[in-house]
Image: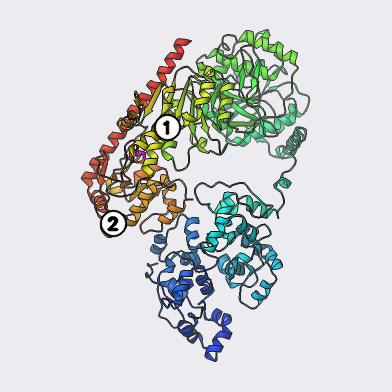
Amino acid sequence: MTQTPDIPSAYGPGDEPRAHVPLWAVFDPDWYRGRYRDAVIGMVGNMPDDRGLYEFWLRDGARYAHSPNRYFDEIWYRRAHFDVENGIRMGVFDSGFQHYCETGHRGRSCHWLFSEGGYFSLNPDLTPSLVRELGFANGYDHYLAIGQVERRASSAFFVPDLLRAGIFQNRLPFDPATGEFSRLLTSTDLGALRTSWYFDPVWYLDQYPEVSAQIASGEYASPLHHYLSNETPTAYSPTPYFDETFYLARYEDVGRQVAARALRNGYEHFVRFGVFEGRRATKEIAFPPFSCDGDMPDWKAICDNPYTAFVKRDGEANEADIPELPSLRALASLQALRGESLLPLLARTPLDFRYVGQPALSVIINAPETFLDLIQTLASLHDVNCGAMQVILLSGHARDETANVARYAYGLEVISSEQGNLQGGWRRAGAAIAAPQVLLIDPGTTLFAGALNTAIARLAQPGVIAVAPQILGLDLRVVEAGVSVARDGSCTAHGAGEDAFAPIVNFVRTCDGVGGGALLCRTSVLRAIPAIDDGLGALRIAAHSWAGLCLTLRQIMRSGRIVYDPNFLIRVPEREIAGEALVAQEALILRRHFAEVLRGNQPHRPGSAIMLHKPVRWGQRILLVKRAISSAQPTQRERLQSLCRAFVALGLQSTVFALDEQRPHTETISATLPDEIEHLQGGIECLGQLIEQRPRGFDQIWIMGGHTLNAVFQLFNDKAALLPEEGVVLDLRSLDAVQARFDARKVQAVRDRIDEADFDQVLADEVANAWFCQDIVVADVAQEQVLGKVGVTGVTILGDDLPLHDSPDFDNRHGLLFAAQPATAPGYSATFLKWFVRNVMTRLNGRLAEPVRLVLACETTQSHDLSMITHHQNVAPLRDGQADFAALAAQCRLLITPDQVEGHVAFDRLAAGACGLPAVTGGEAALQGAASAPFDPTAFAEAIITLYQDRETWQRLSDEARQQARAMTTVYRDTLASLLRQSLVKEEMRD
């Protein structure tokens, strides 16, 4: 399809054929004849033919607010854009259609059910320039031709899937080749169907009976058409769950916008903003704020939020949808019924565990108490399908169907074992194990999808001799997340009663073992178990037998670790509770047999299952405290991830605490951290509880930011006896005062003078408590100098971790890159980006040998500012910038960055340099791996054009950028290891 002319025009019967005509520009004589019959006859005296009717519309009809077709609404266009209406009255335009063709089609909407701006913001893979390159006049043209068939969205009042469901439910004709939008506009049988959860057509007609008469007269096509097009929009409410009068009276700011015609009515504000801000829909209906990943909602948030959920329930309270949870006994009965339902199937098609050669995994199933437990475990093992598997069954001489298990599963190896003697059974089965790794499992235990593969991968790590699972009960609550054994022999199931994957159980760590369910271990270690003496052989509590096995494994291989992995997820039946006397008796046995192994553990069991003790022999313990990191702070997130990776590589037991008083339990950054990182979140009170639960439980504290230190300073003073005496590090690589100064600037060649005294005072307040810390780290010499002016000296230059990436050469790179994530929030990055797109990008047109696009590297498409920036020519769709920054940096030829201020680190430029990507940056300062350009649009464009085409200079700057990243990474890793190793040596000296 060829590119359309810049100015579309109407197309009607008798016109010369064109390559492409937007559907909204095609005159429809049949529709026009039916819609304006009386008006045409009244003015002409008869009904012309198709060509005559088209000429009448061009000459007279358009001036009298006649629409050329059902896809362009002349009256709505004039009402929605009052400047157009004024222009028509002044004689500037003959009609709204003329205005739309000449200028309006580039960004305005011409139909009450389609939003031009919404189409691009809700479909981030499209931009205005892209649809023009595809041969369409604008987004509406693309939507009518392609988008509606693809079920794309543009307006909260039209959900294609909802209308399609109504069509099917009412058994109405359906053509998959016709989009729901056209189906709605061309049909008379869909007016009463829902097109959105934001409008109720049936209720609307009942509430406003006069609307039915207006629809019958042909003035409006449907209830929704009336609501979105009537002349008094504040006089109507769209659903019983929104009160227009109440909303305008309660929220005066909205009323002012409606009065200024910035909004059509209060409901427009509610749908676009109020739903997500937590504003009341009526006096009685209120919802909490609904957070979005950005400053505007995506289509999922528009369709699925507390308000739409309330409407879908017809206004019923949410609690009505919550079923009563079944008891554990009921769940156990259901589990047994599931086992019984498997028997007929397995009798006809038995499970097959036969293998050829060496199996990848051996499984030892403990002697079952019931046959149904055994069947469910066998079925679960068969479903995981992780390669050739040897299954060994310890037979306890059961009298039920267990003796005939071969009828239901082929290839089982049965070894006689004394009922209840787990240690003896495992040792006896050890000689028969054929695989290098073995899974010990209780009958009745079932594995979740992917759990066993996760455990096998974890076992392959150096030093790991066994992997413990996250054990859930039948109610899917945690039964055990690793077992802790105190020096007195008492065993504690960590995390019992918590939700699955709760923060306190959702990280990989070293543990003492398990108390049942399953354990994956190395065959060589299991075979080395010595003969069981009378003491361990007398253990009757299964949890103690399992714990005894784990402690024995650790006794055999003292350097080995048993690792708990929450993704090794299993479910077990309800466990029996042993008597206190027997528990105490067997704890004494464990204490006597494993005194040396337990020497570094706590003397007694913790006060609750959520209290976790991390012995220092498993690695130095570090607490990192930070504030919640917003989506507009990618540098802080990258630095946190680098620190956590380094902590894991150095063998530290790491806890990250996100200090967030306003939005507890909302930060999602934990998913991007290594599995070994414990990530907690809460306010000062929660942090205080953590310190109290783990007295002297941390050997070092890393604090990210001066304001973070100020927030916890009083708490750390009060809890000083529970914290390390030394080893407190303050990370000042990000200074809020410097960032504020950076964001306050304007894009101009001559900078405004800044009150240095005010800046110094703000910075001094930020770092007022820096003296509390033994070490202070900064990013570079410039930050060291800035801090020196306010009395902070003796800092360590840490820099950043910038691992190098392989990337294509000059000829295989194309386009420009801008790190746009910081621009999702107000500040200098956003200001610079707008200046660059408006003033510099246009000067590149026709100056380069190839078309050049600007890619906006960003993690969210829910940014109004970035979405609007993509409307400029040669800016790529937001979806193109969703890839990893390193991958984007490896594809593009140049990076565009703002200029720097003293103390502010251009992390995106450094990270791009690790991929060999040179930058063009504003300002006069000479920077490694970058070409500087003055803040003159022409000069800035010339700098880009020169470097984009100069292979030799580009290669030199690329090499410089790589060398800078390599040197900084070396300094970072050596310095960080030195800081942490120094504290580790001190800890060892104290021991």
**Label 1: which secondary element:** helix
Check the image and name the residue furthest to the left: 952
Name the residue rendered at 43%, 29% in the picture: 643
Task: Tell me the kind of residue under disc 1.
Answer: Glu
Q: Is residue 229 visible?
A: yes
Dominant SS type (magenta):
loop
As drawn, the label of residue 844 is 2
Say which of 562 and 886 sits in front: 886
* Range drawn in magenta: 900-907
Residue 179: x, y in percent?
Answer: 55, 65
Estimate the spatial distance between the alpha carbons at disc 1 and disc 2, rounded to whole Å.
43 Å
Residue 528 occupies quadrant: top right
Q: Is residue 178 visible?
A: no
Q: Residue at x 52, y 90 (%)?
A: 44
Picture mark count? 2
x and y percent of residue 320 in the render?
A: 73, 47
Q: Nearer the viewer, residue 18 or 155?
A: 155
> How far across and how far down the image is residue 474, in percent?
70, 33
Q: Is residue 903 magenta?
A: yes
For residue 766, which numbered disc appears in the image?
A: 1
Q: In this view, does 327 lie above or below 108?
A: above
Q: Residue 782 carries which label?
A: none
**Relative depth, front residue between 848 and 254:** 254
Up the image or down, 375 lies above or below 24; here it is: above
Q: Does the magenta stretch include residue 286?
A: no
Nearer the viewer's eye, disc 1 or disc 2?
1
| Residue sitting nearer the eye, 526 or 317 | 317
| Relative horizontal placement of residue 698, taking residue 243 as reference (left or right) | left
